[in-house]
């Protein structure tokens, strides 16, 4: 069995194998899902309280990488960040002792196991996936009742946490619609549950909730944040693409539109005419292709061992495309472009068959590519984490 079983079926391992179709059809962005696995060691290996202690007490963390939260007493960052913007380790330990939750933001950036989990879930959702770690002392609560502006999967690793779910005052809020204390009421208490080690919960964005430690042990959980793109994003790109072909959309607003006495009647009718025309002009593919390329380019390259094993390539070596590593072969004039993590790579048209073979998922050797300087092509793909030695 894999030492990291969550990588075989990332979402299925969290919510239950075989439940993905029902999850996306009925639950995703609509309601919470609680999964009790009765398997305390299920997520052992992702992170531990000992790991948190090591990170907090030995690494020179900067402001933003670590935060403290306490539902009963506001903790200003000045209380644990020094004048040089480094985290004061002693202050963190002292505040934790007095009931504050330790939060490690973007923990996947410095923990390989969490990074691999994010990579697997990004393949499922086609979205940026991030992890924050929450270590809450016994009998404590980090945050008051609130909602998140992105969907989350909560992975309970150690200890227990009691959760309370309320109403959803705003459905699927935009990324920029952060929670504001006092603006929305929590509403009625709809659900209560306790997450124990090995359990997982999905909480959609906009759903009011709070949580506090249950029992006499500290609670450690991972919050996996799913940062999605929306239909509104696609529509904005599609309209922009139409504007490149439509002089009418590029015309200026009427002179004097900012004056108080401006008559908006004609402008309203003209806008309706433009919108009616858009219905026949907008195209999904160009806008979605741009979304795809933006998503791929924004991913970090997963090129572990690219430096250690940067030596000569042998004719006996075998390679295969990296699993769940997004890329796309495209044309740009006379060049062949591989859109990949961090940007794009340029090749000649003669190299396209070799690229399609190398990135197609089958095992291959340098000799299988049948192209000049095949070893250089393989070296480039290895350096950017698109393929790996097997």
Image (spheres, rainbow, N blue to C red):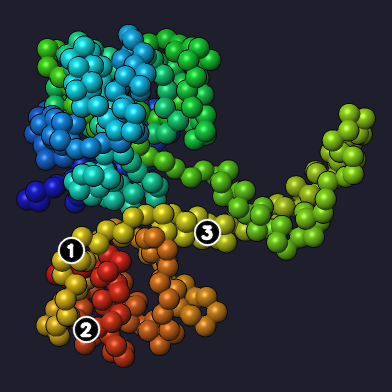
Tell me the quarter of the picture where residue 196 sits: top left
* Distance of label 1 from label 2 (alpha carbons): 19 Å
- Residue lying farthest to the front in this orientation: 83
Tell me the quarter of the picture where residue 226 sits: top left
Question: Which callout, 1 or 3, points at the residue further toward the start of the chain?
Answer: 3
1 vs 2, front mark: 1
Tell me the quarter of the picture where residue 281 sits: bottom right
Say which of 4 and 255 sits in front: 255
Q: As displayed, is residue 232 above or below residue 343?
A: above
Q: Is residue 361 visible?
A: no
Residue at position x 25%, y 62% from top? 303
Q: Which residue is mark 2?
A: 366
Question: Which callout, 1 or 2, points at the residue further toward the start of the chain?
Answer: 1
**Any mark on residue 74, and which?**
none
Q: Which residue is mark 3?
A: 290
Q: Is residue 315 visible?
A: yes
Residue at position x 20%, y 48% from top? 112
Q: Quadrant of the C terminus?
A: bottom left
Q: As displayed, is residue 33 above or below residue 247?
A: above
* Distance of label 3 from label 2 (alpha carbons): 32 Å
* Distance of label 1 from label 3 (alpha carbons): 31 Å
Q: Which residue is mark 1?
A: 305
Q: Is residue 43 left or right of residue 347?
A: left
């Amino acid at each position: 069995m894999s030492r990291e079983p969550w990588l075989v079926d990332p979402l299925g391992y969290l919510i239950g194998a075989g439940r993905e179709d029902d999850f996306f059809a009925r639950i995703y962005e609509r309601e919470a899902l609680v999964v009790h696995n009765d398997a305390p060691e299920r997520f052992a290996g992702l992170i531990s309280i000992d790991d948190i202690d090591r990170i907090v007490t030995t690494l020179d963390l900067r402001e933003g990488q670590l935060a403290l939260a306490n539902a009963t007493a506001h903790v200003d960052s000045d209380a644990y960040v020094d004048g040089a913007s480094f985290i004061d380790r002693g202050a963190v330990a002292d505040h934790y002792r007095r009931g504050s939750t330790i939060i490690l933001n973007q923990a996947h950036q410095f923990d390989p196991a969490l990074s691999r989990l994010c990579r697997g879930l990004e393949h499922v959702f086609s979205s940026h996936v991030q992890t924050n770690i929450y270590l809450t002392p016994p009998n404590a609560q980090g945050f008051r009742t609130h909602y998140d502006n992105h969907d989350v999967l909560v992975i309970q690793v150690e200890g227990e946490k009691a959760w309370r779910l309320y109403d959803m005052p705003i459905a699927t809020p935009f990324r920029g619609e952060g929670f504001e204390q006092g603006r929305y009421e929590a509403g009625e208490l709809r659900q209560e549950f306790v997450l124990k080690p090995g359990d997982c919960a999905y909480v959609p964005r906009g759903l009011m909730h709070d949580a506090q430690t249950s029992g006499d042990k500290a609670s450690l959980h991972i919050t996996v944040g799913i940062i999605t793109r929306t239909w509104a994003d696609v529509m904005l790109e599609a309209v922009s693409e139409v504007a490149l072909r439509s002089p009418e959309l590029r015309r200026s607003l009427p002179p004097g539109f900012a004056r108080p006495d401006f008559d908006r009647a004609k402008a309203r009718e003209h806008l309706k005419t433009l919108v009616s025309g858009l219905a026949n002009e907008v195209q999904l593919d160009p806008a979605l292709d741009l979304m795809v390329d933006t998503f791929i380019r924004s991913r970090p390259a997963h090129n572990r061992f690219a430096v250690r094993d940067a030596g000569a390539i042998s004719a006996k070596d075998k390679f295969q495309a990296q699993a769940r590593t997004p890329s796309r072969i495209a044309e740009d004039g006379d060049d062949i472009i591989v859109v990949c993590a961090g940007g794009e790579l340029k090749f000649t048209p003669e190299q396209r068959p070799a690229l399609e073979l190398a990135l197609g998922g089958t095992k291959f050797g340098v000799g299988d590519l049948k192209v000049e300087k095949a070893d250089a092509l393989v070296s480039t793909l290895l350096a950017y984490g698109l393929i790996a030695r097997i």
